[in-house]
Image (tube, grey):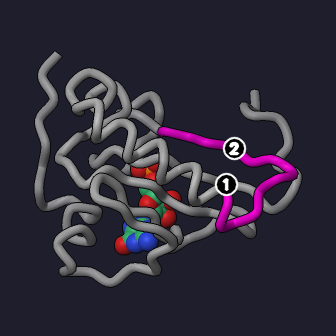
Amino acid sequence: MDFVYDDQNIFAKILRGEIPNKTVYENDHALAFEDIAPQAPVHVLVIPKGAYVSLDHFARDASADEQAGFMRAIAEVCRLTDVAAGFRAIANTRAHGVQDVPHYHMHIIGGRQLGRMLQG
Ligand code: 5GP
């Protein structure tokens, strides 16, 4: 599958500093920031700094260092947001997954009981 990255997407602009964000955590390979429209008391987006459109793109093509940095960022977000009671990690992907922003991102959502994963 070809993965075509559009560098005008909103998260690319955030990475370039063209749009502000509320940063939760950052390392060499990943940035984590508050979602602009939170669905729960904790709603953080973790994105790789590389140009990857989706989870399957990142899983296929990112280097081991990029993948480790991204996963470590998730660990730090979970620690910093204190989601010991639990959370949900969501990577919406393309049309069926209703992905709005075509730069890979993991939603970390928690801070309340979230209910069952899928409705209907
Ligand atoms: P998706 O539907 O692609 O999985 O989720 C995209 C997420 O990005 C949504 O939860 C939306 O609220 C968030 N979002 C969209 N634009 C911005 C923005 O400019 N700043 C931040 N912080 N979040 C955004």
In percent of width and height, residue 33 lies at: 47, 69
Tell me the quarter of the picture where residue 94 sits: top left
Which residue is the site of mark 2? 88
Q: Which residues are magenta?
A: 79-91
Image quarter of the C terminus: top right
Check disc 2 and give the amino acid type. Arg
Whole-Å distance between the Cαs marked 1 and 2? 5 Å
For label 1, the residue is 109
Residue closest to the eye, 58 or 8: 58
The answer to whether 64 is drawn above or below residue 52 in the figure is above
Q: Does 110 sit above or below residue 91?
A: below
- Residue 86 relative to residue 102: left or right: right
Q: Total number of numbered labels?
A: 2
Q: Residue 97, position in %: x, y?
A: 47, 33
The vertical placement of 120 against 75, above or below, is: above
Q: Quadrant of the N terminus?
A: top left
